[in-house]
Image (cartoon, helix red, strand yellow):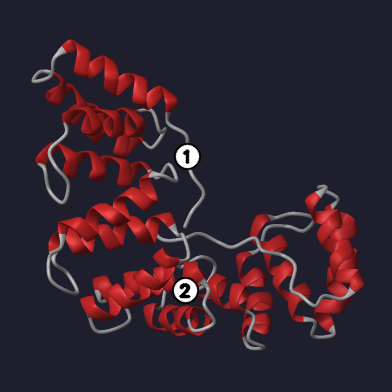
Amino acid sequence: MKAAITFLLLCLPALADVAAGVQAYVKGDYATALKEFLPLAKQGDVAAQHNLGVMYDQGHGVPQDYFEAARWWRLAAEQGHAGAQFNLGLMYDEAHGIPQDYQEAVKWYSLAAQQGYADAQYNLGLKYYFGKGVVQDYKEAAKWIRLAAEQGNAQAQNNLGVMYSEGHGGPRDYEEAVKWYRSAADQGFAGAQVNLGLMYHNGQGVPRDYVQAHMWYNLAGASGDPEAAKTAIKNRDELARTMAPAQIAEAERLAREWKPRAGR
C-alpha cells in the first residue's frame, strides 16, 4: 500500500494571498481559493502551484483534470517543492493522469525523500523492495522505509516489521519486528495489529501470550479494513478455541479500553 496524494497546502514562508487561499480552501470556498492561487501560480509561486495542482486533482473549484494537476505539480516540483515532487511521483507510479513510468516515479520520490518527506521515503522504499523502476535491493528498501518509519509513518513501520520478520535487508530479528509492529499497531494500523497478534500467538519476539494476541486480533477485526479484519477474525476465532473463558473476557476488556497513540 502506497502513501496517497498529499494535501499539505501551506509553504512557509508564504505570501499573504497564499495563506488567504488556504483559509478559503479549508472552508470549502473553492472559488476564492482559486482566485488567490491562480495569479500567484502563474507568477511562479511554488506553494500556489502546488495548491492549484491539488484543486485540479480533486476537482475543487475547477473541473477535475489530472493532466492539469500534473502540470502544476511539475512546475512546483522543478522548484524543489517536496509535496509536489511526491505527488508527481505518485501520478507516474499509478498512471494517474499521465502514462505510468516507474523510473520517473523513482526520480521524483527520490528528490522528495532526500528532503526528508516521509511518504516519499516510504514509496521509494517500496520501489526498491519490489524492483520497480530500480534494481531490486532490500537493503536500500530498508534504508528508506526505516527513515519514514522513524518519522511515525504507520505503513512504513508495519512494512519494516515485515522485513525484519522475513530477514529482508538484514538478519531476521523478531524482537525488532515486534517493536515496529507495535509502533504501527498503537496508531491503529490494522495490518500491524494482525501482525502483532501473530507474534504473541506464536511467541516470536515476545513471550507467547494468547490474551494479548486475542486483543490485537479483536482490534484489527473491528478496524474497518476488510482484508485485515477477515484475517484477524479468523485467527481470533481459531485462537479462542484454545483459551479459557476468563482469558477471552480479559482480552475483550483490554480491547475495549485500548486507545490509539500518536505516531512516533
| The disc label shown at residue 260, or none | 1
Nearer to me, 241 or 68? 241
| Amino acid, disc 2 | Tyr
Q: Residues within 10 Å of mark 1 (few under 14, many from 20)?
A: few
Quadrant that contains the N terminus:
bottom left
Relative side of 40 to 97, left or right: right
Residue 29 is situated, as x and y percent measured from the top left of the image, at 86, 50
Residue 180 is situated, as x and y percent measured from the top left of the image, at 31, 56
Residue 124 is situated, as x and y percent measured from the top left of the image, at 39, 75
Question: Viewer-nearest of labels 1 and 2?
Answer: 1
Mark 2 or mark 1, which is nearer the start of the sequence?
2
Q: CA distance from mark 1 to mark 2?
A: 34 Å
- As drawn, the residue found furthest toward the top would be 245
Residue 185 is situated, as x and y percent measured from the top left of the image, at 36, 45
Q: Look at the numbered disc 2 and give the secondary structure of its residue.
A: helix
**Residue 28 visible here:** yes
Relative side of 200 to 79, left or right: left
Considering only vertical position in the picture, is 216 above or below 98?
Answer: above
Residue 105 sits in which quadrant? bottom left
> Which residue is at 12% across, 48% downward?
204
Considering only vertical position in the picture, is 186 above or below 155?
Answer: above
Q: Which residue bears the numbered disc 2?
A: 92
Considering only vertical position in the picture, is 39 above or below 20?
Answer: below
Nearer to me, 157 or 245? 245
> Which residue is at 36% across, 41% downward?
190
